[in-house]
Amino acid sequence: MDPGSKLPLSPHIQIYRLPLTALLSVVHRATGVALALGAVLLVWILALAANSAEAYGQLYPHLASWYGQIFLLGLIFSLYLHFCNGIRHLFWDIGMGFDLEIVHRTAKFAIFAAIVLTVATWAIAANLEL
Amino acid sequence: MDNLSTPLSRVKGLGSAKDGTTHFWRQRLTALILIPLVLWFGFSVASMPVDHATLVGWIQQPAVAIGLILLILSTFYHAQLGLQIIIEDYVSTHSTRTASIIIVNFLCLLFAIIGVVAVLKISFGA
Protein backbone atom coordinates (compact mmCIF):
# COMPACT_ATOMS: atom_id res chain seq x y z
CA MET A 1 0.00 0.00 0.00
CA ASP A 2 1.11 3.60 -0.67
CA PRO A 3 2.79 4.84 2.59
CA GLY A 4 1.26 8.29 2.17
CA SER A 5 -2.22 6.88 1.89
CA LYS A 6 -4.88 8.36 4.16
CA LEU A 7 -6.84 5.10 4.15
CA PRO A 8 -7.73 4.02 7.68
CA LEU A 9 -5.67 1.21 9.18
CA SER A 10 -8.22 -0.38 11.40
CA PRO A 11 -8.64 -2.22 13.61
CA HIS A 12 -5.06 -1.69 14.73
CA ILE A 13 -5.11 -4.58 17.14
CA GLN A 14 -2.25 -3.48 19.46
CA ILE A 15 -3.63 -0.04 20.23
CA TYR A 16 -7.30 -0.91 19.84
CA ARG A 17 -9.28 -1.19 23.08
CA LEU A 18 -11.57 -4.18 22.67
CA PRO A 19 -15.21 -3.44 23.47
CA LEU A 20 -16.64 -5.63 26.23
CA THR A 21 -18.66 -7.60 23.67
CA ALA A 22 -15.55 -8.50 21.62
CA LEU A 23 -13.60 -9.35 24.76
CA LEU A 24 -16.41 -11.66 25.92
CA SER A 25 -16.41 -13.32 22.50
CA VAL A 26 -12.70 -14.19 22.79
CA VAL A 27 -13.15 -15.21 26.42
CA HIS A 28 -15.98 -17.54 25.37
CA ARG A 29 -13.54 -19.45 23.16
CA ALA A 30 -10.76 -19.40 25.77
CA THR A 31 -13.06 -20.69 28.52
CA GLY A 32 -14.35 -23.32 26.07
CA VAL A 33 -10.81 -24.66 25.61
CA ALA A 34 -10.18 -24.48 29.39
CA LEU A 35 -13.42 -26.36 30.07
CA ALA A 36 -12.49 -29.11 27.59
CA LEU A 37 -9.39 -29.63 29.77
CA GLY A 38 -11.62 -29.41 32.86
CA ALA A 39 -13.76 -32.21 31.41
CA VAL A 40 -10.61 -34.32 31.06
CA LEU A 41 -9.86 -33.59 34.74
CA LEU A 42 -13.39 -34.72 35.68
CA VAL A 43 -12.91 -37.98 33.75
CA TRP A 44 -9.53 -38.46 35.42
CA ILE A 45 -11.09 -37.99 38.89
CA LEU A 46 -13.89 -40.45 38.03
CA ALA A 47 -11.36 -43.00 36.76
CA LEU A 48 -9.32 -42.67 39.98
CA ALA A 49 -12.48 -43.05 42.08
CA ALA A 50 -13.47 -46.13 40.05
CA ASN A 51 -9.99 -47.59 40.50
CA SER A 52 -9.62 -47.44 44.29
CA ALA A 53 -10.07 -45.26 47.36
CA GLU A 54 -6.25 -45.06 47.61
CA ALA A 55 -5.82 -43.80 44.04
CA TYR A 56 -8.54 -41.19 44.58
CA GLY A 57 -7.04 -40.30 47.98
CA GLN A 58 -3.72 -39.35 46.36
CA LEU A 59 -5.32 -36.63 44.22
CA TYR A 60 -7.63 -35.29 46.93
CA PRO A 61 -4.96 -33.33 48.94
CA HIS A 62 -3.92 -31.53 45.75
CA LEU A 63 -7.48 -30.36 45.07
CA ALA A 64 -7.84 -29.28 48.71
CA SER A 65 -4.50 -27.36 48.72
CA TRP A 66 -4.29 -23.62 48.10
CA TYR A 67 -3.18 -24.03 44.47
CA GLY A 68 -5.89 -26.65 43.89
CA GLN A 69 -8.52 -24.32 45.33
CA ILE A 70 -7.39 -21.39 43.15
CA PHE A 71 -7.44 -23.71 40.12
CA LEU A 72 -10.93 -25.01 40.97
CA LEU A 73 -12.24 -21.47 41.59
CA GLY A 74 -10.94 -20.42 38.17
CA LEU A 75 -12.44 -23.50 36.54
CA ILE A 76 -15.85 -22.96 38.20
CA PHE A 77 -15.88 -19.30 37.15
CA SER A 78 -14.90 -20.30 33.59
CA LEU A 79 -17.71 -22.84 33.57
CA TYR A 80 -20.36 -20.35 34.67
CA LEU A 81 -19.06 -17.59 32.38
CA HIS A 82 -19.18 -19.93 29.38
CA PHE A 83 -22.59 -21.13 30.61
CA CYS A 84 -24.11 -17.63 30.93
CA ASN A 85 -22.54 -16.28 27.74
CA GLY A 86 -23.62 -19.50 25.97
CA ILE A 87 -27.24 -18.80 26.94
CA ARG A 88 -26.71 -15.29 25.49
CA HIS A 89 -25.63 -16.99 22.24
CA LEU A 90 -28.73 -19.22 22.28
CA PHE A 91 -30.95 -16.11 22.47
CA TRP A 92 -29.11 -14.66 19.46
CA ASP A 93 -29.71 -17.95 17.64
CA ILE A 94 -33.47 -17.46 17.98
CA GLY A 95 -33.06 -13.87 16.77
CA MET A 96 -33.35 -12.06 20.08
CA GLY A 97 -31.19 -9.37 21.70
CA PHE A 98 -29.28 -7.99 18.71
CA ASP A 99 -29.72 -4.27 19.47
CA LEU A 100 -26.37 -2.65 20.29
CA GLU A 101 -27.58 -1.40 23.66
CA ILE A 102 -29.04 -4.80 24.61
CA VAL A 103 -25.90 -6.62 23.45
CA HIS A 104 -23.84 -4.54 25.90
CA ARG A 105 -26.37 -4.95 28.70
CA THR A 106 -26.53 -8.76 28.32
CA ALA A 107 -22.71 -8.90 28.23
CA LYS A 108 -22.56 -7.20 31.63
CA PHE A 109 -25.41 -9.34 32.91
CA ALA A 110 -23.69 -12.60 31.81
CA ILE A 111 -20.54 -11.62 33.73
CA PHE A 112 -22.60 -10.60 36.76
CA ALA A 113 -24.63 -13.85 36.71
CA ALA A 114 -21.44 -15.91 36.37
CA ILE A 115 -19.99 -14.19 39.48
CA VAL A 116 -23.23 -14.80 41.42
CA LEU A 117 -23.31 -18.51 40.44
CA THR A 118 -19.61 -18.92 41.32
CA VAL A 119 -20.07 -17.28 44.74
CA ALA A 120 -23.23 -19.36 45.40
CA THR A 121 -21.49 -22.65 44.48
CA TRP A 122 -18.40 -21.74 46.48
CA ALA A 123 -20.48 -20.67 49.52
CA ILE A 124 -22.44 -23.94 49.52
CA ALA A 125 -19.20 -25.95 49.33
CA ALA A 126 -17.45 -23.84 51.99
CA ASN A 127 -20.45 -23.96 54.32
CA LEU A 128 -20.23 -27.75 54.23
CA GLU A 129 -16.71 -27.81 55.67
CA LEU A 130 -17.59 -25.66 58.70
CA MET B 1 -22.00 -17.34 -6.74
CA ASP B 2 -25.30 -19.10 -7.37
CA ASN B 3 -24.59 -19.79 -11.03
CA LEU B 4 -21.41 -21.68 -10.08
CA SER B 5 -23.23 -24.41 -8.13
CA THR B 6 -25.13 -27.20 -9.81
CA PRO B 7 -28.92 -27.39 -9.44
CA LEU B 8 -28.48 -30.65 -7.46
CA SER B 9 -26.03 -29.05 -5.01
CA ARG B 10 -28.38 -26.07 -4.61
CA VAL B 11 -31.43 -28.22 -3.89
CA LYS B 12 -29.52 -30.30 -1.35
CA GLY B 13 -28.40 -27.09 0.39
CA LEU B 14 -25.43 -28.75 2.10
CA GLY B 15 -22.71 -26.31 1.00
CA SER B 16 -19.00 -27.02 0.54
CA ALA B 17 -18.61 -28.79 3.91
CA LYS B 18 -21.28 -31.30 2.75
CA ASP B 19 -23.09 -31.31 6.09
CA GLY B 20 -25.15 -28.09 5.88
CA THR B 21 -26.19 -26.82 9.31
CA THR B 22 -25.60 -30.16 11.10
CA HIS B 23 -22.51 -28.96 12.98
CA PHE B 24 -24.18 -25.70 14.04
CA TRP B 25 -27.40 -27.47 15.06
CA ARG B 26 -25.71 -30.20 17.13
CA GLN B 27 -23.61 -27.61 18.96
CA ARG B 28 -26.86 -25.86 19.97
CA LEU B 29 -28.61 -29.11 20.95
CA THR B 30 -25.71 -30.17 23.18
CA ALA B 31 -25.61 -26.63 24.66
CA LEU B 32 -29.30 -26.84 25.48
CA ILE B 33 -29.07 -30.23 27.23
CA LEU B 34 -25.98 -29.02 29.12
CA ILE B 35 -27.92 -26.15 30.77
CA PRO B 36 -29.82 -28.35 33.28
CA LEU B 37 -26.98 -30.91 33.51
CA VAL B 38 -24.32 -28.31 34.45
CA LEU B 39 -26.54 -26.68 37.11
CA TRP B 40 -27.43 -30.09 38.57
CA PHE B 41 -23.80 -31.27 38.58
CA GLY B 42 -22.31 -28.03 39.92
CA PHE B 43 -24.69 -27.64 42.83
CA SER B 44 -24.75 -31.40 43.64
CA VAL B 45 -20.98 -31.68 43.93
CA ALA B 46 -20.80 -28.40 45.88
CA SER B 47 -23.37 -29.62 48.42
CA MET B 48 -21.71 -32.89 49.42
CA PRO B 49 -18.40 -33.86 51.00
CA VAL B 50 -16.15 -35.23 48.27
CA ASP B 51 -14.43 -38.06 50.13
CA HIS B 52 -14.26 -41.38 48.26
CA ALA B 53 -17.10 -43.15 50.13
CA THR B 54 -19.58 -40.26 49.65
CA LEU B 55 -18.67 -39.82 45.99
CA VAL B 56 -19.03 -43.55 45.23
CA GLY B 57 -22.31 -43.75 47.17
CA TRP B 58 -23.64 -40.78 45.19
CA ILE B 59 -22.66 -42.25 41.79
CA GLN B 60 -24.19 -45.63 42.76
CA GLN B 61 -27.67 -44.05 42.67
CA PRO B 62 -28.97 -44.99 39.17
CA ALA B 63 -30.39 -41.52 38.48
CA VAL B 64 -27.00 -39.96 39.26
CA ALA B 65 -25.16 -42.43 37.02
CA ILE B 66 -27.57 -41.66 34.16
CA GLY B 67 -27.11 -37.90 34.72
CA LEU B 68 -23.31 -38.21 34.80
CA ILE B 69 -23.21 -40.31 31.61
CA LEU B 70 -25.45 -37.77 29.85
CA LEU B 71 -23.19 -34.97 31.14
CA ILE B 72 -20.00 -36.70 29.95
CA LEU B 73 -21.38 -37.54 26.49
CA SER B 74 -22.88 -34.10 25.82
CA THR B 75 -19.82 -32.29 27.23
CA PHE B 76 -17.33 -34.11 25.02
CA TYR B 77 -19.58 -33.87 21.96
CA HIS B 78 -19.99 -30.11 22.59
CA ALA B 79 -16.23 -29.77 23.22
CA GLN B 80 -15.37 -31.64 20.02
CA LEU B 81 -17.66 -29.40 17.94
CA GLY B 82 -16.30 -26.22 19.57
CA LEU B 83 -12.63 -27.18 19.36
CA GLN B 84 -13.11 -28.08 15.69
CA ILE B 85 -14.40 -24.54 14.98
CA ILE B 86 -11.43 -23.00 16.79
CA ILE B 87 -8.97 -25.19 14.85
CA GLU B 88 -10.69 -24.37 11.55
CA ASP B 89 -10.46 -20.63 12.36
CA TYR B 90 -6.85 -20.45 13.51
CA VAL B 91 -4.95 -23.33 11.85
CA SER B 92 -4.52 -22.34 8.22
CA THR B 93 -2.25 -25.13 6.92
CA HIS B 94 -4.59 -27.71 5.45
CA SER B 95 -2.68 -30.83 6.55
CA THR B 96 -2.04 -29.55 10.10
CA ARG B 97 -5.66 -28.51 10.37
CA THR B 98 -7.00 -31.89 9.27
CA ALA B 99 -4.56 -33.74 11.54
CA SER B 100 -5.48 -31.54 14.55
CA ILE B 101 -9.20 -32.10 14.02
CA ILE B 102 -8.71 -35.88 13.74
CA ILE B 103 -6.62 -35.92 16.96
CA VAL B 104 -9.15 -33.76 18.85
CA ASN B 105 -12.04 -35.97 17.68
CA PHE B 106 -10.20 -39.09 18.74
CA LEU B 107 -9.24 -37.68 22.16
CA CYS B 108 -12.80 -36.46 22.85
CA LEU B 109 -14.16 -39.91 22.00
CA LEU B 110 -11.48 -41.60 24.11
CA PHE B 111 -12.07 -39.44 27.22
CA ALA B 112 -15.85 -39.77 26.87
CA ILE B 113 -15.51 -43.57 26.84
CA ILE B 114 -13.12 -43.57 29.82
CA GLY B 115 -15.60 -41.38 31.74
CA VAL B 116 -18.61 -43.55 30.92
CA VAL B 117 -16.75 -46.78 31.81
CA ALA B 118 -15.60 -45.24 35.12
CA VAL B 119 -19.19 -44.24 36.01
CA LEU B 120 -20.50 -47.69 35.06
CA LYS B 121 -17.77 -49.45 37.04
CA ILE B 122 -18.60 -47.41 40.16
CA SER B 123 -22.34 -47.76 39.65
CA PHE B 124 -22.16 -51.57 39.31
CA GLY B 125 -19.99 -51.75 42.42
CA ALA B 126 -16.28 -51.13 41.94
Image: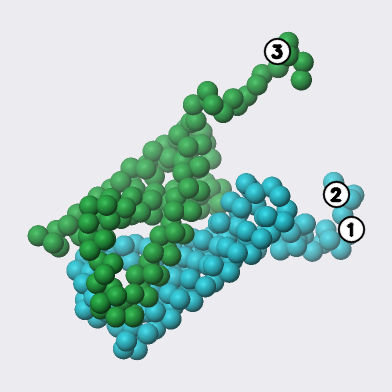
Chain colours: A green, B cyan
**Extreme-top residue of the structure:** A4
Chain of residue at mark 2: B
Chain of residue at mark 3: A
- Residue B76 x, y percent position in the rendering: 50, 66
Question: Given contact means CB atoms under 8 Å apart, are the residues at marks 2 and 3 in contact?
Answer: no
Q: Residue at x 86, y 63 (%)?
A: B8
Q: Tell me the element at label 3.
A: loop
Q: Which residue is mark 2?
A: B2
- Distance from disc 1 to disc 2, alpha carbons, whole Å, reads 8 Å
Q: Which residue is mark 3?
A: A6
Q: Which amino acid type corresponds to the residue marked 3 in the rendered image?
A: Lys
Residue nearest the observer in this picture, A22 or B103: B103
Q: Which residue is mark 1?
A: B6
Relative to A63, is B116 above or below?
below
- Mark yes or no: residue B55 visible: no
Number of marks present in the image shown: 3
- Residue B37 x, y percent position in the rendering: 39, 66
- Mark yes or no: residue B92 visible: yes
Relative to B85, is A26 above or below?
above
Q: Tell me the element at label 1.
A: loop
| Mark 2: few/some/many CA within 10 Å (<14, 14-19, 20+) | few
Residue A8 position by quadrant: top right
Chain of residue at mark 1: B
| Mark 1: few/some/many CA within 10 Å (<14, 14-19, 20+) | few
Question: In the displayed structure, does residue A25 sit left or right of residue A66?
Answer: right
Q: Residue at x 77, y 15 (%)?
A: A2
Q: Which amino acid type corresponds to the residue marked 1 in the rendered image?
A: Thr
